[in-house]
Image (cartoon, coloured by chain):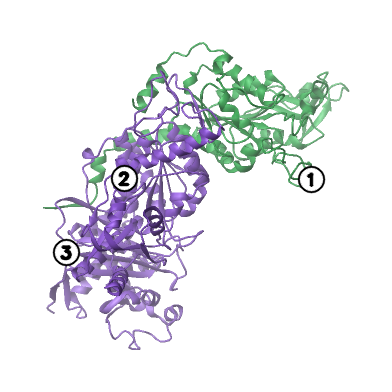
Chain colours: A green, B purple
Amino acid sequence: MLVEEIKKEAAAVQVPKYTAKDFQSDQDVRWCPGCGDYSILAQTQRVMPDLGIPRHNMVFISGIGCSSRFPYYMDTYGFHSIHGRATAIASGLKMARPDLTVWVVTGDGDGMSIGGNHFIHLLRRNVDVKVMLFNNQIYGLTKGQYSPTSELGKVTKSTPYGSIDYPFNPASLALGASATFVARTMDRDPKHLQAVLKKAAEHKGTSFVEIYQNCNVFNDGAFFHFTEKDTKDDNVVFLEHGKPLIFGKEHDKGIRLNGFTPEVVSLKDGKYSVNDLLVHNEKDTYLSFILADMTFHTDVPRPFGVFLAVERPAYEAEMTRQIEFAKQKRGEGDMNKLLNSGETWVID
Amino acid sequence: MKKSTKNVSDVTIRFAGDSGDGMQLTGTQFTNTTAILGNDLSTLPDYPAEIRAPQGTLFGVSGFQVHFGSTEINTPGDTCDVLVAMNAAALKVNLGSLVDRGAIIVNTEGFSDRNLKLAGYASSPLADGSLSKYQVFEVDITKLTQLALADSNLSSKFIDRSKNFFALGLMYWMYNRPMEPTIKWINSKFASKPDIRDANLKVMQAGWSYGETTEMFSVRYEVAPAKLAPGRYRNITGNQATAWGLMAAAKKAKMDLFLGSYPITPASDILHELSMYKNFGVKTFQAEDEIAGITSAIGASFGGALAVTTTSGPGVALKTEALGLAVMVELPLIVVNVQRGGPSTGLPTKTEQADLLQALYGRNGEAPIPIVAACTPSDCFEAVFEAARIALKYMTPVFCLTDGYLGNGSEPWLIPNFDRLQDISPKLRTDPNGFMPYLRDEKTLARPYAIPGTPGLEHRIGGLEKQHLTGNVNYEPQNHEFMVKIRAEKVERIANDIPLAKVEGDQKGEMLLVGWGGTYGAIKTAAINLRSKGFNVSHLHLKHLNPMPKNVGEILYNFRQILVPELNLGQLVKVLRSKYLVPAIGLNKIQGQPFKSTEIENKVEEMMKGKS
């Protein structure tokens, strides 16, 4: 059967009513007990049935690292590739087969370090690929070296005197690379994680989702500040499109812009009201940079949610458009005509 | 004055000038016109890595050599009969390749004091008698060009740039070639710039008329058409043939062609060529680096495209890890290496054959990859088509080795009938019954090609060792050894599916010359010349280097001596010695230049005289 025929048949198949179980493969999951990856896998499997896409049209592609074992556990097409290159493989697949839904699973080492180059180029091209970056701020599979997102001063096996590498903020990096969809969520908030993944799936173009993920073996509690019940409310602000930035256990604090600088204000002392607060607009690229930059500032809460979701033509769609244009203009290519084109001569 | 015409069987002309002088264009135009006249020919573009090196310098000299004749032409010529030197540096760099009594046409304007100094001449070679053994024709091309364009409105910069057309017109006159093909080309190339179009046409005509009227040239030469096999011909470069071969393969595979590539000399022209044919459904992707070039192609292959990456040696070095992945996941992939001088950045614009062992062994682990090598510019079409056939049938990455000499060189090509090329479409798996990702075909040992989108065949592949049949991750000792062996055997079995090697000359005898790749023409010419001198010399040229044809050992054992000429320190010779335990000897040249056939002839004569 030809590729074209398979594509046609695949599109004609009526999408069954899936449950999360339909996306579980027959392979035993081999992450460490207590790893944040389990939650991410479970939420992904829960979201997939809602997308209305047949399983055989989904492909999960990963690189190398703990997170990159992910495709083995999804009962879709999958490709566990080599370190850092999942984004490039996914780009090629999506260009060849725009009809497929392509997800990339990567980590802070795989995506930000060895795969940093492919990562930024994927984003600027806006290939319609969904990227989940499991950020645990450590190298897990190689047993505990610092990563490009580890904080300054971090003591690890390869930094006994503390890390002197200034970390990447993946959201800012993605925005700097002209991403059209940038979001952050966490393993320990299943509802938020599901909601963000769904939004990422619906976006046309590259979706980038940074997921804070706890590595309970080599970097336990790195994000507890943001994920645990007693500290979360005061340290996290959830971004919602069209809504003011409010946070705090009592919903009594907000973020307002002082010039270009976000600052925390109290909604209790009568000085400021909700009307003074910054209202999130995920279509505003300027604002997205400011919000993402709040990440490493300790005087403001850390933002989670969708930083930016804007429209720009997807790369593979433009590629298809050029091909259709050329076919229309020059006619479907004819190999015999081409071989005999230009200057030729006959010898009798 | 009355001009006489002399018939000659073959001529080699070398155009040389500054890298901005348009010598490649001049050479290409002369070549195309000559091809249309029915001469056989072979070309050697020889240009510096710098785009516009400082004017007048030795390292900025760009040359284009074309050898054409009424007989079979297999090389661009060991020496040249005519040297067109646009300046002193061009003369100095190229004089060594001119035959005694050869003709030099110099642009006198290029021999100013400054030019002489830049070229390192203490005195002008035009005046000091050092060129007395040649026929020197001094022509003030620059001034004659300016005169021809006296009434044009072009700036002096543009006027100066068209002087190569004067040289071209003069050579067309001298070798009795029509100007029409170039006139046609100029008309279409400069259609939107009528000033420049008219200037170039005028200057070329001026060059022709100069030959016709000046007393300096009393003889014109006639080179009759060659007796080539009947049929329709075109001129083609190796890189163009590679691009077209890939397109033909995709059509015959009933797949879309996907090229993931990063610009690199001397392979970029394949990317340029393929990016023009979007109406053939060709998808070209200029990736962010060599690694993304190959990995995007692997992704496309997974999706059911005929996937290719094109590059040169340094690019292959970067693709190494991904090549191993392609071996492990057993997906079809074509890797074209247009070899150049190495190591490292090496000699980007010069040719070499030093990547054979890289293609054979340059990966971690036991990672066998089939290798096909092209032997002439037009053979790149067949070689890359064959690489595609093997890749799809055996579910494997395949190397197609060409080189800078083949890629940029050109020759007349008997145009193949596309309809007669074989169907190479893969059998895509669709039946979920009994499907296992690593269940192998009994004959070829290929695993099934199951592309995403096929209901019921959802499966996972990856770089970790696979369990036989299921493809699940598996670290068991016996399984690993089994899988390593079966991957090796799969590649070995391709030997059952390729033509037996053919010897040119006696099938048994004194001396066998064994070559591969772009040395074909030089070795063939050497063998023919040696045989005409009475030496018993045969020639075996390998197109399949991994696996080799099944009869190679048998052939080797039929000869008393084996000489392996290669543009490296001895790579094929190593393989032959270790595989067949024969006392083969290497003849090695690593100068960024192709072999001269005389270099091979001299070595053979030395060996055969020494033994007899």
Residue A94 image point, x, y percent: 47, 32
Residue A209 image point, x, y percent: 63, 29
Distance, label 3 to label 1, CA atoms, is 76 Å
Viewer can see residue B153: no
Q: Please tell me in which quadrant of the rendered image residue B418 appears.
A: top left
Residue type of the residue flagged with mark 2: Trp
Residue A83 image point, x, y percent: 58, 39
Helix, strand or loop at disc 3? loop
User: Which of the two labelled residues, at mark 2 and mark 3, occupies the earlier sequence position?
Assistant: 3
Q: Is residue A256 left or right of residue B484?
A: right
Residues marked 3 and 1, same chain: no
Q: Nearer the viewer, residue A232 or B513?
A: B513
Q: Chain of mark 3?
A: B
Residue B359 image point, x, y percent: 44, 50
A233 is higher (above) or lower (below) than B59: above
Helix, strand or loop at disc 2? helix
Q: Which residue is mark 3?
A: B70
Residue type of the residue flagged with mark 3: Ser
Q: Chain of mark 2?
A: B
Q: Which residue is mark 1?
A: A160
**How busy is the neighbourhood of tag 1: few (under 14 within 10 Å), some, or many (20 plus)?**
few
Q: Is residue B174 left or right of residue A181?
A: left
Residue plotted at (79% across, 45% down): A160
Helix, strand or loop at disc 1? loop
Q: So how many labels did they put on this image?
A: 3
Distance, label 2 to label 3, CA atoms, is 28 Å
* Residue B244 disc label: 2
